[in-house]
Image (spheres, coloured by chain):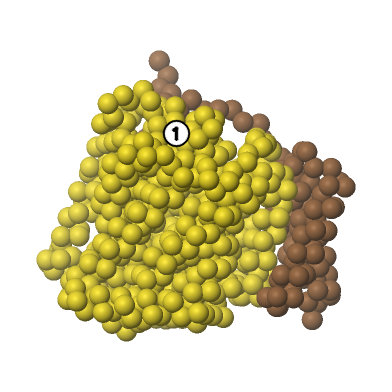
Amino acid sequence: MMRRVNVKDCVGGALVLLLGIGAAAQASHYELGTLRRMGPGYFPLALGVILAVTGALIMLASVGSAPAVAPIRQRPEWRGWFCICASMVAFAVVGLYGGLLPATFACVFVAALGDRQNSLAVSAVLAAAMTLVCVAVFWGLLGVNLPLFGWG
Amino acid sequence: MIEQSLIDLWHGFGIALEPGNLMWSFIGVLIGNLIGVLPGMGAISAISMLLPLTYAMHPVPAILMLAGIFYGSQYGGALGAILLNLPCHPPHAVTCLDGYPMTRQGKAGTALGITMLCSFFAASVGIIVMIVASPLLVQISFKFGPPEIFSIMLVGLLAGATMSRGSPLKGVAMTVIGLLLGVAGTDVLTGTQRFTFGVTDLGDGVELVALALGLFGVAEFLRNVNRMDAISVPLKMSMRDMRPSRADLRQAFPAMLRGTAIGTLFGAVPGTGPTITTFIAYALERKIARDPSRFGHGAIEGVAAPEAASHSKTQVDFIPTMSLGIPGDPVMALILGALLIQGIQPGPQLMTEHADLFWGLIASFWIGNVLLMVLNVPLIGLWVKLLAVPYRFLFPSALFFIAIGVYSTKSNLFEVWEVLAFGIAGAVFAALDFSVAPVLLGFVLGPMVEDNFRRTLLLSHGDAMVFVQHPISAGFIGISVLLISVRLYIWLAARRRGVPDRVEALVAGLPPG
């Protein structure tokens, strides 16, 4: 009989293992020093090794462990995920080249499109409303350091 | 010593009641309550979003405001749990079990009234414990040198890693990732750039606000988008509904006492999250009830006990945070981070060097709780309306608040990229059933752990045995070993027989925290 593998744990353990190896490898480039006089690399290297070992243990434990709760299969939400990430990118990029006002509009507009119930028009109205709030509160009241239009 | 504490406390009330400070406390409670009520927003999001605002403020009003936000958002979370069955705030998830059935029976007002009463009572008890215990703890902790500090931080980190939900191994992994993030940036002793990969913006290290908002804000929205059911129960609530009847009070009172006791007990253990505390309080109520079948169908004890437990727990949590510099949960880690940003090193010296802040804070806790009561009675109608804001309008607006919040920490758009990166990472780990709360704990403690580790071995000339040769330190190391073995044993035993309990299954299915 095949032993059931908890896929989530196995993947998660592998991810942790890789992160640990990566951190340890990177830390070994820094000066290690001795236990008596530790360099900047000593502690991170130790953490990386601990992390890698933990990852390996999680992978080992994933073999033969049935999931505690029957997993609920959820559809991937590509539209939502993409729009949320894109809205952050929009704020950063538009904020750099266009200023606070267009960045706010772009950020809220793109994010709102991530919800399947929001139409273009609804998103635009929401974005416009948030832009007003932003100008009043963050620019007017709190004096955020980003110019309303343009950069510099 | 107690007399001295009381005199200091009196002085603290004077500070907290200064009009300026009182105003910030009030604003904090109001905004915190406002944000906490919104679905999907918790204390962590509320505090980290507003943290940048406090950079320019004086330490005392800044911390008073943050504490107010914390209270407000905590209470706000209970509203969503009771009225809409939304377990967005992990500590309130258990409250849903009986709070929502009460709403459906038309007793929402009673449930909210009891919640308010319990939170006030539990917090008051917690504050008294704090007044008595803090000076004692400080006296002891003056004997602490680097090895003791390292060992007690180890206890805190291990408790945080292993006492959260799910596999303790995963908790350890998340804690270590947090520690690694904490040491990224310029090494204080040598000036070496660590884990910056040539990005100059990372030279100052990872930004606390970006990490918190990424893991608990962006990641939550990524997980919930298009998955939050629109609930639009037209609810009307007025002040009169909130007064519980005498019979309700008689039923809830013992549960409130027990919940408070459990919360106080667990508050003393650093690293135990509030979620697990509320769960234990609920389980106890169900176990000792004469008729356990009432639970899940609107038993008032099922609301009173967990709410009392969570409030006394968070209150007592401030003791290790302020007097030892060891936060008990992610929210405390954030408050600790805020103190560090203000240039105040929490620890035994805090009470002597910043007595005004310490005792002012304690006084403001109590004032904050009074404000919460005063605010919530007339504003309940408004909160209920806010609860009805659809998620599809809420999350785009919240994302904007996150973006502008992280931007204003350093007036640098790089932080927006950082928050996005942590958001995606947090969502991936959460999808793989990791609890991300220990990351924040590890992150805040990371630099301190490394510093004390290095210092200890420098003083002992490289002899690692020093940690078990100092008696206090050895005690903490012993506790750590005990903690690991007990937790591993419980976990293995639970794995062998599966998870039979419905409540446990519910807690296991919750968002991390």
Q: Which residue is mark 1?
A: B98
The answer for which chain carries disc 1 is B
Chain B shade: yellow
Q: Is residue B509 left or right of residue B494?
A: right
Residue at the spot 61% in from the left edge and 60% down from the top edge:
B419
Where residue B148 sits, quadrant-wise, is bottom left
Q: Is residue B445 left or right of residue B27?
A: left
Q: Is residue B478 left or right of residue B383?
A: left
Residue sitting farthest toward the bottom: B353
The amino acid sitting under disc 1 is Asp
Q: Relative to B274, does residue B250 appear above or below in the rendering?
A: above
| Secondary structure category for the residue under label 1 | helix
- Residue B470 locus on image (x, y percent): 13, 68
Q: Is residue B97 visible from the viewing direction of this image?
A: no
Chain A shade: brown
The number of numbered badges drawn on the structure is 1
Where residue A150 sits, quadrant-wise, is bottom right
- Residue A47 locus on image (x, y percent): 38, 59
Q: Residue B173 versus residue B241: which sits nearer the camera?
A: B241
Residue sitting farthest toward the top: A1
Residue at the spot 29% in from the left edge and 33% down from the top edge:
B492
- Residue A107 locus on image (x, y percent): 76, 58
Q: Quadrant of the N terminus of chain B?
A: bottom left
Where residue B132 sits, quadrant-wise, is bottom left
Q: Is residue A4 visible from the viewing direction of this image?
A: yes
